[in-house]
Amino acid sequence: MMADRQPPREPAGGRGPIRLAKLMADRALCSRREAERLIAAGSVRVDGRVIDQQGTKVDSEARIEIVGIGERWLADKVTVLLHKPLGIVSTQPEGAQVPAWRLLTRERLHGAADPAVVKRICREPWHLSVAGRLDQDSRGLLLLTSDGVLARRVTGSHAWTKVYRVMVDRPVSDRTLERLNSPRRLDDKPLLAMNVRRLGERLLRFELREGRKHQIRRVCREEKMTVKDLLRLSIGPFTLGDLPDGRWRVVAGYVG
């Protein structure tokens, strides 16, 4: 039986009743969608009582337990690191485009992994969700996961940085580098500060805490530069390392 991680005690009165699925997501037990599935399966117990009705509100300090098949389901969540090549799309393909999940085959597995986990991944790879998209013209680290908490941490917060190695079409001056590191706006909204360093005459290292659509390409374009190559090196604690192009490996031991 999996008991939840209890939050700090709130002042008298707390937050009052709250939807169970939202409370489970707030406590990082699972995503809200996963919580709804667990509730529907009768796998959630609140203060000793099974709750199986969607929308049920509970006390904000209630004790939550995930039991039965729900406990086993959460234990089976998997995360994959893929070195996405150029030309592969992260999300829903259009026309003849190839989605990233099609690369999750036994032949492309890199390193050792539990055979049962590999079998499950390769049987239904489309069930894994992309956490942190990478456009068709970019390459590098891509996360695919069935862990809703991990996906939300990557896409729904600024807690983890993403690091990129970027080649541009002309030498980068000190003044350009200074502007890249200065406060700026994108889509007429303030952009969280970027940490940009020069690795070579035309080679830059970008460290981002948010990921607006085509952010790096767009800010480079504003500085009269064109991105010639964009490689994502890391997302939070996950790194590309020596993972070969087009290959994938299973993450072991990550706790969201």
Image: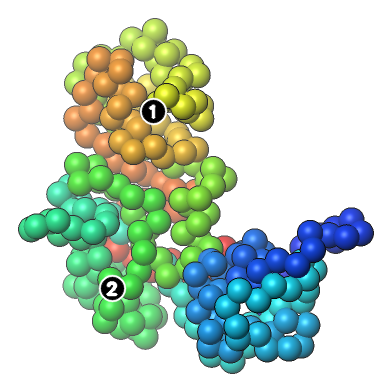
Q: Is residue 25 left or right of residue 37?
A: right
Residue 223 horizontal/vertical position (percent): 30, 15
Q: Residue furthest right?
A: 12
Which amino acid type is shown beneath numbered disc 1? Asp
State the image quarter where residue 200 is shown: top left
Density class for disc 2 (Cα within 10 Å; few <14, some 14-19, many ≥20) is some
Quadrant of the drawing holding the N terminus: bottom right
For residue 79, above or below residue 164? below
Residue 155 horizontal/vertical position (percent): 46, 50
Quadrant of the drawing holding the C terminus: bottom right
State the image quarter where residue 65 is shown: bottom right
Q: Is residue 203 left or right of residue 103?
A: right
Q: Residue furthest top?
A: 175
Find numbered disc 1 in the image and state the secondary structure of the residue it sits on: loop
Residue on which the image places disc 1: 187
The residue under the point 73% across, 81% down is 46
Can see residue 151?
yes
Which amino acid type is shown beneath numbered disc 2? Pro
Q: Is residue 99 left or right of residue 39?
A: left
The residue under the point 53% across, 88% down is 41
The residue under the point 39% across, 51% down is 132
Q: Nearer the viewer, residue 39 or 227?
A: 39
Residue on which the image places disc 2: 125
User: Quick one: label 1 or label 2, which is nearer the N terminus?
Assistant: 2
For residue 60, above or below residue 218? below
Can see residue 199?
no
Give the color scheme: rainbow, by chain, secondary structure or one colour: rainbow
Q: Nearer the viewer, residue 46 or 223?
A: 46
Residue 206 horizontal/vertical position (percent): 40, 31
CA distance separating discs 1 and 2: 34 Å
